[in-house]
Amino acid sequence: MQILAPTQAWSELETSVKLTLLGSILSDSSEDPAFSFMGQGELGFAATGNPDVKAEISLSAVYTDALITPPEDLLKKAYIRTHFDILRVTAGKTRVAWGDGFVFNAGDVVFGSMIPVADLSASLLRDATDWMADLYLPLADFSFIEAIILPYSPERTPSSPLIEADTLRGGGRIVTKLAGIKIETGYLFKGDAIIHNPYVSFQGNIFFDAYISASMSIPAVDPAEQDIRNGLAVSGGIYRIFSLDDSSSLLVRLEAASWPFGIWNENDAAGFGNEDRFGILLYPEITWSPSDILALQLRAMINPVDSSGMISFMTSFSIYQGFDVMGYTWVMYGDANDTYFGFDRPVTGGGLGISAGFRYIY
């Protein structure tokens, strides 16, 4: 008689900690300077020892004078990714990257990446996650098919553990490469909003990495011509890191987002009906690292239509490995009634600001 010992799963557990502490002085044209404090922390655990299975759990929270992270967002990631012979399966709460773009990405029909980001100090400006089941089938080098289903609507109020079938979101994409150009096209149906979202994206390199994406948001029931026109979104950008002779590096990035049939005249913003769909938005970024311990960064969100924007200048010193001392100076400019930015809008917390603090990543 032969006794078989049970097979025991094993893995190596990697722990990660990211903590950011910032103190700020804020002011605008109508109020005296005010002080604020922000703490942001992320704790992650990843099981990586098994090459065929990866699991990760991540907790994230932001604290000012109170916890401002919604309870449902405290769990940032919780997923299992399994590799079979010809298929990769991911289930849980995580992020997928459809389309191309660091800030603006019309191809990101899953999470949406077409409105400005309020916090330019984050290392990743788009990091939203959601619950999903994802199937990834490789076809050849640089080619694959992916299918996804997302059970929970962003507009859902968790009053019942049951999920209605007509609120599901799901779709897929196919990615390939032709003549050095990555070609991606896909589709997502949002059952909660009853909307079709097809998209296409191209990425290549001509001195700069260049990319462009376009998507449509089409009501599934009786779409009017105006609905289709207003649902067209386009984004694009260029990006490159230059390695200079003095061992320094220079990162240059420029991205744009456009609603071609959106708002191109500031006077039309109030009566458009979709006040956040401007004809064009810009995101420029320049980061110069003269040494391994010093980085200078300029980021901006610019709305040329209403002549408003936000500019952020950052200085970072890497005192120890993973430990940075940071300083920020930022300014908002524009009129008080501008949709995103405005120098003296109380809701912004101020039109001028200076922040300093620490970031530790382990």
Image: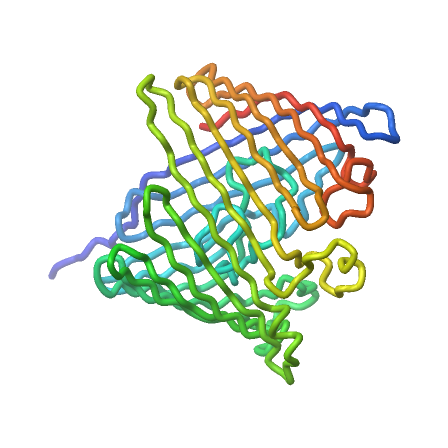
Residue 122's image quarter?
top right
- Residue 315's place in the image compared with 101, above or below, is above
14 sits left or right of 231 in the view:
left
Residue 133 pos. (x, y %): 44, 64
Residue 124 pos. (x, y %): 51, 40
Residue 227 pos. (x, y %): 65, 74
Q: Residue at x 40, y 42 (%)?
A: 46
Q: Nearer the viewer, residue 207 or 328?
A: 207
Number of on-image labels: 0
Q: Quadrant of the N terminus?
A: bottom left
160 sits left or right of 344 in the view:
left
Q: Nearer the viewer, residue 43 or 305?
A: 305
- Residue 342's place in the image compared with 354, above or below, is below
Q: Residue at x 44, y 56 (%)?
A: 212
Q: Residue at x 43, y 45 (%)?
A: 238
Q: Residue lying furthest left in this view?
A: 1
Residue 166 pos. (x, y %): 59, 78
Q: Quadrant of the C terminus?
A: top left
